[in-house]
Image: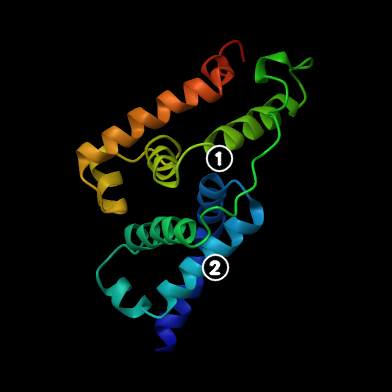
Amino acid sequence: MQKAEESFRRYVGDRLVGLTRVAYLLTGDVHQADDLVQATLERVASRWERIERHGDPDPYVRRVLYSQHVSAWRRHRGRDVPVAEPPEPPGSRSGSDDHSGRVVLSVAVAQALSRLSRRQRAVLVLRYFEDQTEARTAEILGLSVGTVKSYARAALARLREVAPELATAGEGS
C-alpha cells in the first residue's frame, strides 16, 4: 500500500501543473480549476493501485477530470455569472516585446471558451490544446467519434461567432 501511495504522490507531483492548466481551460476560473483537479485526484487516489496496474494512468485520470467537469456543470447549472466584454482584440497591442499581447490573447481565448457548452469546451481543449486525435478524444469523453466531430464543428462555429478576433490572432506575431 505504501508503494502505491508513493507512486501516486510522484504522479501528482509530475502532472499537477498540466492537469491544472487543462482544468483552467475547461472552467475559465482558477479556483474552479483547483477544485476540479482536487475532486479528480480524490476520486483517482482511492483506486490508484488498480489504475496503475493497467499501465499508463494518464488516460484514466484525464477521463475522470473531464467527467468531473461535466458532472459539476450539471450540479451547478444556472449559477454561472456572465463575463464582461472581452478586452481589446489581440492584434491591437502596442509593443511586441512585452507579454501583454499574449495575456490579452489568453484572456480572450478563456472568455471565448466560457461561452461554449461544457462538452464543446472539453472537445476543443482535448483536440486543440492537448493535441488529441478524434478517436482519443471520443475515448476520453465516452462519446462516439461522430459526436466529437459534431461538437468540434459546432464549437468552432460558435467561437467564430462570439470571438471573430481570434481568427487573426496568430497572424503578424
Instruction: Indicate which disc residue 114 carries.
Output: 1
Q: Residue furthest top?
A: 172
Instruction: Inspect the image, locate mark 2, and give the three-letter code of the amino acid beneath it.
Output: Gln
What residue do we see at 63% from left, 30% from top?
108
Q: Is residue 96 left or right of residue 67?
A: right
Residue on which disc 2 sits: 38
Give coordinates of residue 171: x percent, y percent: 56, 12
Alpha-carbon distance for marks 2 and 1? Answer: 21 Å
Which of disc 1 and disc 2 is earlier in sequence?
2
Q: Which of 7 and 135 lies nearest the eye of the viewer?
A: 135
Is residue 46 at least partly visible in the picture? yes
Q: Is residue 123 left or right of residue 99?
A: left
Q: Residues within 10 Å of mark 2 (few under 14, many from 20)?
A: some
Q: Which quadrant of the view contains residue 134?
A: top left
Instruction: Inspect the image, locate mark 1, and give the three-letter code of the amino acid beneath it.
Output: Ser
Give coordinates of residue 94: x percent, y percent: 79, 14
Quadrant of the drawing holding the N terminus: bottom left
Circle 2 or circle 1, nearest the eye: 1
Give coordinates of residue 116: x percent, y percent: 48, 37
Q: Is residue 39 left or right of residue 123?
A: right
The answer to whether mark 2 and mark 1 are in CB contact below 8 A is no
**Mark 2: which secondary structure?**
helix
Q: Residues within 10 Å of mark 1 (few under 14, many from 20)?
A: some
Q: Residue furthest front?
A: 78
What residue do we see at 59% from left, 55% from top?
79
Give the color scheme: rainbow, by chain, secondary structure or one colour: rainbow
Give coordinates of residue 125: x percent, y percent: 44, 41
Location of residue 58 with respect to 128 vertically, above or below: below
Q: Which quadrant of the view contains residue 35?
A: bottom right
